[in-house]
């Protein structure tokens, strides 16, 4: 084979320095790609090798723009990013391309968690609460009696349940959570707990109003304090800002009976450890395989499982309060992992 003119070789080396591919250089010089490859190996072996593959349709600027849209909340999904980046992209790209690059840069799609809406006033109130209690020790939190209401379904939780299945496995009773047209019924439960363990739980009969709430305080709360050997002077009572809880009649009852009621920020179930105690109770109830025939049977089972909750489980939750307060401070009053 006749050697190439030196000028042609120099032109090839210059084009390689410019970053052109072998096929592009071959088109411009008329030299076969295998010959160009040999010249590159002998005379330009320090040239970085191409990783191969098709060039990315999205530039680094566009990818950064997409990440900024996601992180700022202007876009939630790859479809949203695709729509908003049409003016930025010089070439048309698909939603799948956007999704691929977001994954490549460490992002992943998740299901949004359901959480109570936090307005500016809620965020400020939560931050004020955290600032007021950031120096509370465990001894301070031991004095608090936590209270709340919850709904318990006869046929299990309202949330999702997970199960493993084999590839190609058909639908079976093992993979189905049975429901009824009208829900199967449920009951409302009021409960409280403290450092000494769970207090008395009470089934809420009928519609919860101020009168019924005060009667619960008169019976279940007072009985719980007597069971623990405590008086209103020994404790701080916690409740949320439900209108029944903050009614004039309820406030008068607390004042007449000498209770100190904790100032509580609205929209803050993540600060109340009793929410996790409800989770413990409902897990215990879900572990029963025998179906329940009536709400009365459900209440008997609830009573039995409530009494089995140990003081240690309650104390573990109360010990999390300094961490919860720190999480609110870190989030500047916003959402926390709790």
Image: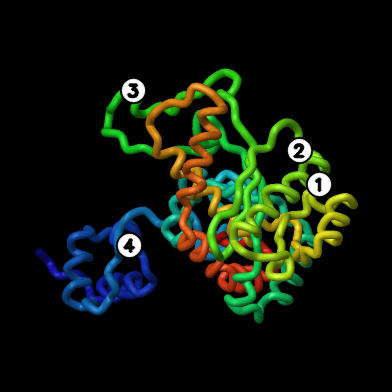
Above or below 206: residue 141: below
Number of marks in picture: 4
The residue depicted at 53 percent of the width and 59 percent of the height is 197
The residue at which mark 2 appears reads as: 208
Q: Quadrant of residue 123?
A: bottom right
Q: CA distance from mark 3 to mark 2?
A: 40 Å
Neighbourhood count class around disc 1 (C-alpha, 10 Å): few under 14, some 14–19, many 20 upward: some
Q: Measured along the vertical axis of the image, is residue 187 above or below residue 94?
A: above
Q: Earlier in the sequence, mark 3 or mark 2?
A: 3
The answer to whether the residues at label 4 and label 2 have Cβ atoms under 8 Å apart is: no
The residue tagged 1 is 244
Identify the residue at image location x=76%, y=72%. 128
Q: Earlier in the sequence, mark 4 or mark 1?
A: 4
The quadrant of the picture occupied by the C terminus is bottom right
Task: From the image, tell me which residue sits under label 3.
Answer: 172
Asked if the residue at tag 4 contacts the one at tag 3, i.e. Cβ–Cβ closer than 8 Å, the answer is no
- Picture quarter with the N terminus: bottom left
In the displayed structure image, the side of residue 261 where residue 313 appears, left or right: left
**Lower position in the chain sequence, tag 1 or tag 3:** 3
Question: CA gap, disc 1 to disc 2?
Answer: 8 Å
Q: CA distance from mark 3 to mark 4?
A: 57 Å
Q: Can you give x and y, in whole percent of width and height, for residue 186 in the image?
A: 60, 30
Q: Which residue is mark 4?
A: 21
């Amino acid at each position: 084979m006749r050697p190439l003119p030196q000028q042609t070789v120099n032109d090839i080396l210059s084009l390689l320095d410019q970053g052109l591919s072998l096929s592009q250089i071959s088109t411009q010089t008329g030299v076969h790609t295998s010959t160009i490859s040999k010249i590159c190996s002998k005379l330009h072996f320090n040239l970085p090798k191409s990783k191969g593959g098709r060039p990315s349709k999205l530039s680094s600027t566009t990818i950064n723009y997409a990440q900024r849209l996601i992180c700022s909340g202007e876009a939630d999904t790859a479809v949203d990013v695709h729509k908003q980046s049409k003016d930025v992209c010089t070439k048309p790209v698909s939603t799948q391309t956007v999704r691929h690059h977001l994954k490549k840069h460490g992002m992943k799609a998740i299901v949004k968690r359901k959480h109570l809406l936090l307005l500016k006033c809620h965020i400020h109130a939560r931050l004020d609460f955290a600032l007021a209690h950031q120096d509370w020790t465990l001894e301070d939190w031991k004095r608090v009696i936590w209270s709340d209401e919850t709904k318990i379904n006869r046929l299990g939780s309202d949330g999702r349940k997970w199960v493993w299945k084999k590839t190609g496995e058909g639908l079976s009773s093992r993979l189905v959570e049975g429901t009824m047209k009208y829900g199967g019924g449920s009951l409302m439960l009021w409960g409280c707990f403290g450092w000494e363990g769970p207090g008395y739980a009470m089934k809420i009969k009928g519609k919860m109003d101020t009168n019924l709430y005060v009667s619960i305080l008169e019976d279940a709360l007072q009985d719980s304090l007597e069971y623990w050997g405590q008086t209103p002077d020994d404790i701080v009572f916690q409740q949320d800002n439900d209108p029944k809880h903050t009614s004039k009649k309820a406030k008068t009852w607390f004042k007449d009976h000498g209770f100190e009621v904790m100032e509580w920020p609205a929209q803050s179930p993540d600060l109340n450890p009793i929410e996790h105690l409800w989770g413990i109770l409902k897990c215990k109830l879900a572990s029963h395989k025998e179906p329940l025939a009536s709400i009365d049977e459900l209440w008997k089972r609830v009573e039995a499982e409530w009494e089995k909750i140990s003081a240690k489980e309650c104390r573990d939750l109360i010990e999390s309060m300094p961490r919860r307060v720190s999480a609110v401070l870190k989030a500047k009053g916003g959402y926390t992992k709790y």
